Structure formats: structure tokens, C-alpha cells
Image (spheres, rainbow, N blue to C red):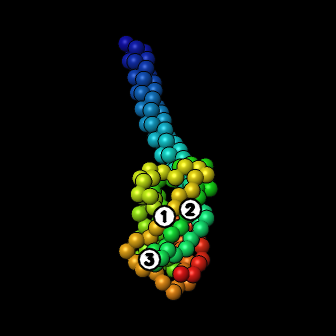
Amino acid sequence: MKGISAVLAMVLIVVITVAIIGLAYGWATGLFELTSEAGQKQVEGITESTQKSVDIVAASCDDTGNIVFTIKNTGTLAIEPDELDAFLNESSDVTVDFALNTDSVVVTEIGPGDSEEFTTTGVNYTDIDAELKIVAPARATTETFTC
């Protein structure tokens, strides 16, 4: 009888050890998969934003003192209007509705290689030296001009 108890005890120890190893393996595998997915999403987001850049093709003032400017998507992905910001002389006081162009046609995105014209609203700029800065996900671009 003593021999059977020792064998049963050994079998129980082995079964418990294997179960603990199995649980630890399952936990570690899930943890690594979760970490890997999060890292992959971050890399994809950064890669995508580096492919969205613009250049200012032209900038000037119209007869009413608004700034009219044309930007071109120089990246490889389309840019949504809410991904763009405009600054005049490093101030965010300038208001640009990137969702509309000058013909009041709704622009849902600026495709790769496409150009769109925009106009500032709400402020009358006259007799100033201006630096217009457009900030896109990949980088900012500036254009200096005089009104």
C-alpha cells in the first residue's frame, strides 16, 4: 500500500505542475498577443500620418482682405479636412473652413496630388507682412507674402 500512495502522490504532483505550466503559458501568450496588437496599431498610425503632407502652392490677399491660398497634397494618402490647421504669423486667430472650398463645394478629402483653394474668414488683413503656416499630420509648411 505504501508504494501505491507514493505513486499517486507523484502523479498528482506532476498533474498539478503541468496544469500550472499550462495556465502560465496561456496567460503569457495572451499578454504577448495583446502587447503585439497595440504596438502594431501604433506603428500603423505613425506610418499613416507620415504619408499625409501638404505644400502651399500660392497665398495672397483678395480685395476684401481675406487670405486666399492653395494647398497641394504631396503625400501618398488622402487628407481629411479636420487633419489640417492654419496659423497666420504664428497665431491661431485665423479661421479657415477646410471642409469648404471657394466654390462652396464640400471637400470630403484632399486626394494624393490634388490641390484645393481655401479662404480665411472673419478677419480683414491689410497692409501686413504675413506668414501662413499649414499644419498637416506629417509636417508643417509655410508661405510668406504681403497683403
How many other residues sit within 10 Å of disc 1, few (<14), some (14-19) or many (≥20)? many
Q: Residue at x 44, y 70 (%)?
A: 120
Q: Position of residue 96 (x, y in %)?
A: 43, 67
Q: Position of residue 128 (x, y in %)?
A: 52, 85
Quadrant of residue 124 within the rendered picture: bottom left
Choose between 10 and 136: the one closer to the eye: 136
Secondary-structure class at tag 3:
loop
Report the Cα–Cα distance between label 2 and label 1.
Answer: 8 Å
- In whole angstroms, how far apart are the C-alphas of marks 2 and 3? 21 Å
For the residues marked 1 and 3, what is the alpha-carbon distance in whole angstroms? 14 Å
Which label is found at residue 118? 1
Q: Which residue is mark 3?
A: 64
Where is 144 relative to 119, above or below? below
Residue closest to the eye, 15 or 97 = 97
The percent coordinates of residue 22 (x first, y second) are 45, 29
Residue 55 vertical position relative to residue 133 in the rendered view, above or below: above
Residue 38 showing in the rendered view: yes
